[in-house]
Image (cartoon, rainbow, N blue to C red):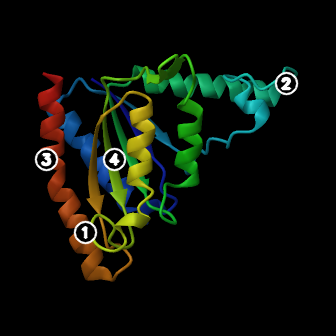
Amino acid sequence: MNVLHIDSSIMGSDSITRDLSAAIVARIQAIHPDTQVQYRDLANDEVRHLSGSIAAGFRQTGISDFPAATLLEHQLSETLVTEFLASDVLIIGAPMYNFSVSSQLKAWLDRIAQVGRTFKYTEHGPVGLAGGKRVIVVSARGGFYADGPFQKMDFQESYLKAFFGFLGITDIEFVRAEGASKGEQSRDKGVALARSAIPDAVARLSAAAL
């Protein structure tokens, strides 16, 4: 099993998603010792946001003259999409920032959305080319968005579902810690609930891998 482990929190050792995503990967490795893990830390090793010249490495932009630094970005885009396509499972630490994903994670997503590699256009509309993968997202939020009056402001999980669905991936599960900014007791409760969901999430992953 090839696992691509992505972290995108800017909070370092205080990060909920980093702790929980590492726990998921460790449990997978304990059950499947032959698991191969590729790790990317998008906060400490940032992927640059798209520009016209960077996007020209995998899109038609009308730009054709590139300095050496931009050619290195084209190589990185190829590396990122190759890692993604080689994975069977993605474990993604995705905290909610301002109702959506971190800009670091968005930059990575923009690099792997490549026509002809992860999706294609047809006469019937776009078709995802990356189906068959499983995604487990560790989602941490300061408030409570899964239910209640703030649910409509959750553009984090809905965006990730839509994005991966566009690439053909429909098997996506969320391990969710809510209430992180509502005091220590609320934070601890949210983390405990998320941690208690890990065994079942990995069990479903293991069953699918058989």
Q: Is residue 20 left or right of residue 117?
A: left
108 to the left or right of 197: right
Which residue is disc 1 drawn over? 190
Circle nearer the N terminus (3, 2): 2
Closer to viewer: mark 4 or mark 3: 4
Residue named by callout 4:
137
User: At label 1, which amino acid type do we have?
Assistant: Gly
How far across and down, in percent of the image, does residue 8 sit?
48, 51
Distance in Å between CA atoms under marks 1 and 3: 16 Å
Which mark, by number, is residue 67?
A: none
* Mark 3 neighbour class, 10 Å CA radius: few under 14, some 14 to 19, many 20 or more: some
First in residue order: circle 4 vs circle 3: 4
Q: Nearer the viewer, residue 55 or 150?
A: 150
**Residue in the picture at 85% in, 24% down:** 66
Residue 66 numbered tag: 2
Residue that numbered label 3 is attached to:
199
Query: Residue at 84% across / 20% down in the picture?
Result: 64
Residue at the image point whose x is 33% and y is 74% from the top = 149
Circles 1 and 3 in contact, beta carbons < 8 Å:
no
**For the residue marked with disc 3, what is the amino acid?**
Pro
Q: Is residue 124 above or below residue 134?
A: above
Q: Pointer 4: residues within 10 angstroms few (<14), some, or many (20+)?
A: many
Residue type highlighted by circle 2: Phe
- Left or right of 163, for residue 70: right
Q: Amino acid at mark 4?
A: Val
Q: Earlier in the sequence, mark 4 or mark 1?
A: 4
Q: Is residue 11 above or below residue 85?
A: below
User: Judging from the image, what secondary structure is the residue with disc 2 in?
Assistant: loop
Along the line of sight, which residue is nearer the eye, 183 or 56? 56
